[in-house]
Image (cartoon, rainbow, N blue to C red):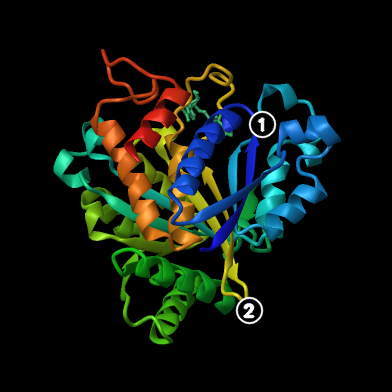
C-alpha cells in the first residue's frame, strides 16, 4: 500500500479550526486502510511570523518541497496589520506558490443538491453541476512587460499592460487540463480571444498541438472567452474542464464559483509541473476563503471548503478517485440531512458548529 506524505499548514484565524476537521477525515481514511497518509505540520502566516519573524521558515519550505501535497488553511488577520511588507502573513503563501512553481490553479464549481435553491439560477440549470476551471497562474497580462503609466505632457497619460505567453507556458497548462479531464468526464473547453489577440491565436494553436500529441482520447473544444462567459451562466453543465489564461481565468472562476454558493463551501488547488522522473506534480490545496477573523476561535466556521480541498487532493494528486468520490458523497449526504453551519443556514434553519459538521461528515463516511 502506498503511503502519501502530507504537509499540513493550518495557518491563522479559522485555518486551525477547519484543518482540525480534515485531521478527523484523515484518521478515518487511515483506519479504513485502503491508503495510508503520513502527516507533518508546520507554521505559516502570522503564527510563523510570531514564532520566527518570517511568514514561512526555510525548514517549512523544505518540508513542503519534500511532501506529496500541501494542505493549506488560511493566513492573516488584524493582529499582523502592521508587520513589514515582505514578512506579512500572505508572503508565506506567495513563497509557496513561487518556489513550488504552481502555475495551474483549479477551481471547481460543484452544486450540492441540498443547496441548489440557494443559487440565483434556476434549479434545473444548476442541479448536479460539477465543472472545473483551470486558470493559468504565473503568466499573461499580470506579469508581461512593459507595464506602465506614462505622462504624455498634454495632461494626458497612457497606460500599458502587456499580455505575453510563450509556447511552453500554454503547452504545460493544456497538458494539465487534458490529464485532469481524463480523471473526470473527458472533455476540455479552451477559452481565449483569438479574434482580437495574438496571444489568443498562439493559445489556440498550442492547445490543439498538445491535444494531437497524445490526448486524442479527450474531447477538445475551442470557444471565444466572451461567448464562454455567456455559456457558463446560460447552461454551465455543457462543460467539464475549462482551460484559460490568467486574466480570463480570474474572471471566469469567480463567476463559476458564485453559480453555486457560499465562500465556506469552495475548495481550490494549485499544481506545478510533473517531475521528469516520477511524473508527480507539486501541489497545494486550500479553501478559497480567507482566515475570517470575525468568526475565528468561535467554533462556527464551515469546514467543508477545507475538507473538499482534501477531496481534490485525493483525486488530483493521488489518483484515489474512489476515496475522493466517497468523501464528496459524504459531504453531500450530510447536507441532504439538513445539517448546516451558520454561513449556509437559511432563514429559520438552525446551525451547528465546525466540529459537529466535521463529525457528521466522518459519521457519513
Ligand atoms: P482574504 O483577504 O484572506 O481573502 P477576506 O477577509 O477577504 O480574507 P474571508 O476571510 O474569506 O475573506 O471572509 C469573508 C467573510 O466570509 C467573513 O465574514 C467570514 O466570516 C466569512 N467566511 C469565510 N470563510 C468562512 C467559513 N469557512 N465559514 C463561515 N464563514 C466564512
Ligand atoms: Mg479576500
Q: Are marks 2 and 1 in contact (CB under 8 Å)?
A: no
Instruction: Give left or right: position of 314 versus 144.
Output: left
Name the mark on residue 76: 1
Q: Classify mark 2: helix, strand or loop.
A: loop
Residue depicted at 37% across the width and 30% down the height: 360
Instruction: Give left or right: position of 127 versus 294.
Output: left
Q: Is residue 32 above or below residue 55?
A: below
Image quadrant holding the C terminus, namely: top left
Give the quarter of the image for residue 266.
Answer: top left
Residue depicted at 85% across the width and 36% down the height: 52
Who comes first in sequence, dot 2 or dot 1? 1
Q: Percent from the top left, x then y, of residue 104? A: 53, 61
Name the mark on residue 98: none
The residues tagged by marks 2 and 1 sit, at their Cα atoms, a distance apart of: 37 Å
Q: Which residue is mark 2?
A: 277
- Determine if residue 108 is in view: yes
Q: Percent from the top left, x then y, of residue 36? A: 53, 54
Q: Classify mark 1: helix, strand or loop.
A: loop
Towards the viewer: 278 or 237: 278
Instruction: Kindly tell me whether mark 1's CB lies below 8 Å from ligand 1.
Output: yes
Q: Is residue 289 above or below residue 203?
A: above
Between marks 2 and 1 in the image, the one whose residue lies nearer the viewer? 2
Towards the viewer: 256 or 34: 34
Amino acid at each position: 500500500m502506498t503511503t502519501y506524505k502530507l504537509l499540513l499548514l493550518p495557518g491563522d484565524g479559522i485555518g486551525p479550526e477547519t484543518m482540525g476537521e480534515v485531521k478527523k477525515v484523515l484518521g478515518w481514511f487511515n483506519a479504513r486502510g485502503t491508503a495510508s497518509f503520513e502527516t507533518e505540520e508546520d507554521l505559516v502566516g502570522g503564527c510563523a511570523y510570531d514564532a520566527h519573524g518570517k511568514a514561512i521558515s526555510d525548514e517549512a519550505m523544505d518540508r513542503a518541497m519534500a511532501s506529496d501535497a500541501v494542505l493549506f488553511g488560511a493566513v492573516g488577520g488584524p493582529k499582523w496589520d502592521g508587520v513589514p511588507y515582505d514578512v506579512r502573513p500572505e508572503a508565506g503563501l506567495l513563497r509557496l506558490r513561487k518556489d513550488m512553481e504552481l502555475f495551474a490553479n483549479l477551481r471547481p464549481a460543484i452544486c450540492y443538491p441540498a443547496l441548489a435553491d440557494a443559487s440565483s439560477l434556476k434549479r434545473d440549470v444548476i442541479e448536479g453541476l460539477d465543472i472545473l476551471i483551470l486558470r493559468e497562474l504565473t503568466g499573461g497580462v499580470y506579469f508581461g512587460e512593459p507595464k506602465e503609466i506614462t505622462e504624455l505632457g498634454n495632461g494626458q497619460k497612457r497606460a500599458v499592460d502587456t499580455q505575453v505567453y510563450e509556447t511552453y507556458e500554454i503547452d504545460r497548462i493544456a497538458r494539465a487540463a487534458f490529464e485532469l479531464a481524463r480523471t473526470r468526464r473527458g472533455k476540455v473547453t479552451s477559452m481565449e480571444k483569438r479574434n482580437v489577440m495574438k496571444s489568443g491565436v498562439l493559445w489556440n494553436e498550442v492547445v490543439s498541438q498538445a491535444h494531437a500529441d497524445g490526448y486524442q482520447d479527450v474531447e477538445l473544444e475551442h470557444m471565444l472567452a466572451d461567448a464562454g462567459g455567456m455559456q457558463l451562466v446560460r447552461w454551465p453543465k455543457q462543460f467539464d474542464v475549462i482551460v484559460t489564461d490568467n486574466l480570463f481565468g480570474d474572471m471566469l472562476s469567480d463567476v463559476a464559483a458564485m453559480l453555486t454558493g457560499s465562500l465556506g463551501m469552495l475548495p481550490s488547488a494549485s499544481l506545478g509541473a510533473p517531475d521528469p522522473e516520477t511524473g508527480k506534480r507539486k501541489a497545494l490545496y486550500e479553501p478559497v476563503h480567507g482566515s475570517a477573523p470575525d468568526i475565528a476561535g468561535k467554533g462556527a466556521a464551515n469546514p467543508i471548503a477545507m475538507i473538499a480541498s482534501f477531496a481534490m487532493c485525493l483525486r488530483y494528486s493521488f489518483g484515489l478517485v474512489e476515496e475522493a468520490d466517497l468523501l464528496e458523497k459524504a459531504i453531500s449526504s450530510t447536507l441532504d440531512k439538513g445539517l448546516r453551519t451558520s454561513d449556509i443556514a437559511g432563514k429559520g434553519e438552525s446551525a451547528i458548529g465546525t466540529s459537529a459538521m466535521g463529525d457528521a461528515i466522518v459519521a457519513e463516511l
